[in-house]
Image (cartoon, helix red, strand yellow):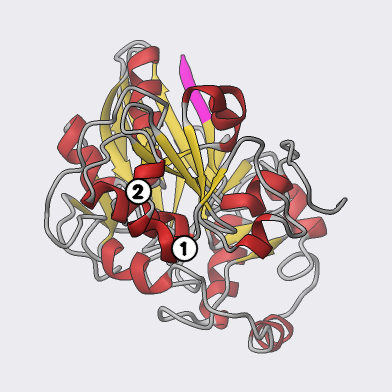
Amino acid sequence: MLIFRQLFDPESSTYTYLLGDSASGEAILIDAVFEQVQRDLALLRELGLRLTHVLDTHCHADHVTSAWLLRERAGARIGIAANAGVEGADDYLHDGDKLSFGARWLTVRETPGHTDGCLTYVLDDESMAFTGDALLIRSCGRTDFQQGDPARLYASVRGRILSLPENTLLYPAHDYRGLTVTSVGEEKRFNPRLGGDIAEADFVGYMRNLGLPHPKKIDVAVPANLRCGRPADGELPPEAPDWAPLRYTFAGIWEVEPQWLEEGADAVQVLDVREPEEFDGPLGHIRGALTIPLGELPERLDELSRERPVVAVCRAGGRSAQAIVMLRRAGFDAVANLAGGMLRWRAQGYPVDGGTSA
């Protein structure tokens, strides 16, 4: 029996896909995210699966892959397109290659255009395909950097993805609206960029005038992903502390999710490092939080107990990440950043003191 799970990283809106063969216990992960490696390994353990391959659909610009880390931690082989320009992989993939997990397999289809090294992975019975950023739900990947070419993307999607059976389910690498899956038939009918009778010239003109800003993490993600996600120092992350379900970022910071903090706030010290006017401003603050602006933190460390974990908070997570660095240098061991800061806390509906109504 096929085991299938669709997993999500809220920070980058990335979908990771787990496919396993229940008889053999072998499994493949597609588009795994560095910060989610603990989650993925836990799921593999719970389902009794052995990871044989970790695959990327392309060299991502918006998150760092956990391919290298999963090879180190789980013994998986790394697979990516042969022409993606990536070093350190085990399997450099070409059109028509097959990747087996137990009695099942994925077939590689080269679908360049978003980048030179874009691949779509098609399940053996063509019931599912994993399209990366080449084809998104009612959209497609951009073509204005990383060797992007709208004419190539048009040919890839129309000739290599939408040529699959109409009932083939299509799973993209990202979605920013909460959509999870589509089908060949749907995209042929309803995709405004690539469906219907859209001609190549129409698509090329459209894509050349998107005017999008570059991804926020591109300067970190692309160099790291060209090494399969291996940190520059080649060091493995430390084992996760046990005081909270933490995740380790590529920047070397432990993070905690808002849901856990809302439930476990009584067990930690919430340290808000924003300025006073922000603490009392429109976003409000977490009840019981201690306010120490980042610039004052070195002189006010004695206001924090070293016996209880510290969760640092700011507007979006940047200043609080620096607070974590400062606390660790000062000898605080149990420290973590609130993922996404107060912006994410408010967006997900968790309670605040003060602030303005949404």
Residue 126, x across and y down, in percent: 54, 38
Q: Which mark is residue 301?
A: 2
Picture quadrant of residue 218:
bottom left
Residue 349, x across and y down, in percent: 75, 39
Q: In this image, 32 relative to 340: left or right?
A: left
Specify which label sits upstream in the sequence, 1 or 2: 1
SS type, badge 2: helix
Q: Looking at the image, how many numbered discs can be counted on the residues?
A: 2
Residue 222, x across and y down, in percent: 34, 69
SS type, badge 1: loop
Give the main secondary structure, helix, strand or loop, of the magenta stretch: strand
Query: CA gap, disc 1 to disc 2?
Result: 35 Å
Is residue 159 something that shows in the picture?
A: yes
Amino acid at pointer 2: Leu
- Near-viewer residue (89 or 272): 272
Residue drawn at the location 28% of the way across and 70% of the way down: 223
Residue drawn at the location 40% of the way across and 55% of the way down: 321
- Near-viewer residue (139 or 318): 318
Is residue 178 something that shows in the picture?
A: no
Residue 29, x across and y down, in percent: 37, 37
Q: Is residue 13 above or below residue 71?
A: below
Residue drawn at the location 76% of the way across and 61% of the way down: 191
Label 1: which residue? 62
Residue drawn at the location 46% of the way across and 14% of the way down: 1
Q: Is residue 156 above or below residue 145?
A: above
Segment colored magenta: 1-5
Amino acid at pointer 1: Asp
Residue projecting furthest to the left: 234
